Image (spheres, grey):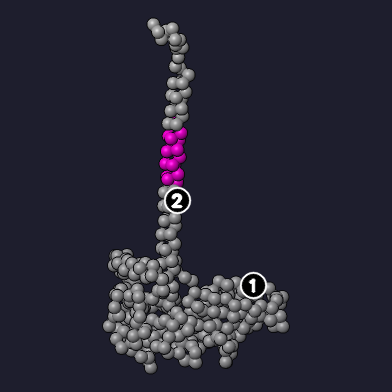
C-alpha cells in the first residue's frame, strides 16, 4: 500500500538547494509534471537568485466544476494564509498556467525548522490550491455548520475533465467519486479492488474510519447531475465524513487522502497488473524450463536406444561364422 505525499519532491529539492546556495546560483528555467496532469514551471534568475517565479497549471476542469478566476473556491485565501509575505500572487498568470507566484526566499524565517516547514508548504502548493474548497467545507463540518453560499452538491476537479462531488451537511459530508479508467483490464481490476476495499472497511479494526460504499449505479446524492459527469465504468465510491474525522490535525490528512483517492486506486491497479504480469512471466519461464528438461531427457533416451541397437547389430555381424561349401560336398 502507498499513500502519496503532498510535497513535490522535485520542487522541494530545488527550493532547499537554492536556500543553501547563499548568493550563488544559476539560471533555472524548467518544467515538471506530476500525476493527474498538474504542471509546474520553475524560474530563477542570476540577477535575483533569491526570488523564484512558480507557475502552476491545474487539471482541465469539467463543465460541472465551478472555478473563480480560473482557481477553485477559496484558493487565493488559502495561498495567503499558508505562505504569508513569502509569496506574492501575480495577476494575470503566465500563458498556459492557472496560477503564477513570486516567492521571495529572503523573507523566510531564520529558524531552520520553521524555514523547512514553509518550504515544504510551498512544495505542497498542489494541495493548497486544489484542496482549498474541500478544506473549507470540512472546516465547517468540524464546527458542525455548513459553509455559506455553497450549493447542496459541489463538484471539485481532481483529474483532467473529471470531478468528484461533495454533499455538505451540518453533521456530515458525503463524498462521491465516479471511477473511470481507460484500459479494459484496469476497469476489471479497479472494480474488484474497490469491492474488496469496501469489505475491508467492515473489519473491527477500522470502525472509526469514514464509512465507505461502492455501487455500479450513481447514488441518490448525484440526482440531477449531467449524464456526462456520471459516465463511470468502474462504479461509484461514496465516503461519509463526520466531524470526528476532521478534528485538529486530522483535517489536513483527510483533505489530502480524499483529494488523491483516484490516484491511490490507479496506483494499486497498476501494481496489481504488474504483479500478475510478473507471475505469468515466471510461470511461462518455469514451463519452458520444464519443457527443456523433458526434451533433454527424451533426447538422451533416444540416443541410448540408438547406441544399444548399434551395439547389438555390431555383435551380430562380428560374432557369426560362415562355412565354405564345395561342389563335392554338395554332391554328397
Nearest the eye: 286 or 293: 293
Is residue 39 placed above or below 63 in the rendered structure?
above
Q: What span is colored magenta in the figure?
A: 289-304
Nearest the eye: 320 or 100: 320
Q: Position of residue 207 (x, y in %)?
A: 30, 69
The residue at the point 48 percent across, 79 percent down is 127
| Tags 1 and 2 touching, CB below 8 Å | no
Is residue 232 placed above or below 65 in the rendered structure?
above
Mark sitting earlier along the chain (1/2):
1
- Distance CA(mark 1)–CA(mark 2): 47 Å
Q: Secondary structure at mark 1?
A: helix
Q: Circle 2 sits on which residue?
A: 285
- Quadrant housing residue 112: bottom right
Q: Circle 1 sits on which residue?
A: 17
The residue at the point 45 percent across, 46 percent down is 289
| Residue 134 visible in the displayed image | no
Dominant secondary structure, magenta? helix
Amino acid at each position: 500500500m502507498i499513500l502519496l505525499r503532498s510535497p513535490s519532491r522535485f520542487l522541494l529539492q530545488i527550493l532547499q538547494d537554492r536556500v543553501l546556495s547563499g548568493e550563488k546560483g544559476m539560471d533555472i528555467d524548467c518544467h515538471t509534471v506530476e500525476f493527474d496532469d498538474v504542471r509546474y514551471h520553475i524560474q530563477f534568475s542570476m540577477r535575483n537568485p533569491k526570488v523564484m517565479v512558480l507557475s502552476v497549471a491545474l487539471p482541465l476542469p469539467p463543465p460541472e466544476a465551478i472555478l473563480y478566476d480560473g482557481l477553485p473556491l477559496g484558493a487565493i485565501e488559502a495561498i495567503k494564509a499558508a505562505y504569508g509575505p513569502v509569496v506574492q500572487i501575480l495577476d494575470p498568470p503566465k500563458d498556459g498556467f492557472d496560477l503564477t507566484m513570486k516567492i521571495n526566499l529572503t523573507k523566510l524565517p531564520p529558524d531552520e525548522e520553521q524555514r523547512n516547514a514553509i518550504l515544504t508548504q510551498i512544495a505542497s502548493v498542489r494541495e493548497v490550491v486544489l484542496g482549498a474548497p474541500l478544506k473549507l467545507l470540512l472546516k465547517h463540518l468540524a464546527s458542525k455548520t455548513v459553509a455559506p453560499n455553497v450549493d447542496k452538491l459541489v463538484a471539485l476537479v481532481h483529474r483532467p475533465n473529471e470531478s468528484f462531488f461533495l454533499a455538505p451537511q451540518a453533521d456530515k459530508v458525503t463524498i462521491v467519486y465516479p471511477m473511470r479508467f481507460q484500459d479494459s483490464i484496469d476497469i476489471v481490476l479497479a472494480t474488484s479492488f474497490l469491492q474488496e476495499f469496501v469489505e475491508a472497511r467492515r473489519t473491527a479494526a477500522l470502525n472509526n474510519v469514514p464509512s465507505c460504499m461502492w455501487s455500479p449505479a450513481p447514488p441518490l446524492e448525484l440526482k440531477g447531475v449531467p449524464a456526462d459527469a456520471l459516465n463511470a465504468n468502474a462504479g461509484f465510491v461514496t465516503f461519509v465524513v463526520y466531524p470526528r474525522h476532521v478534528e485538529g490535525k486530522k483535517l489536513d490528512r483527510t483533505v489530502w487522502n480524499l483529494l488523491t483517492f483516484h490516484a491511490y486506486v490507479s496506483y494499486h491497479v497498476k501494481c496489481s497488473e504488474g504483479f500478475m504480469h510478473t507471475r505469468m512471466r515466471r510461470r511461462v519461464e518455469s514451463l519452458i524450463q520444464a519443457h527443456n528438461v523433458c526434451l533433454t531427457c527424451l533426447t538422451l533416451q533416444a540416443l541410448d536406444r540408438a547406441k544399444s541397437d548399434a551395439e547389438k547389430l555390431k555383435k551380430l555381424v562380428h560374432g557369426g561364422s560362415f562355412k565354405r561349401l564345395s561342389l563335392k560336398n554338395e554332391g554328397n
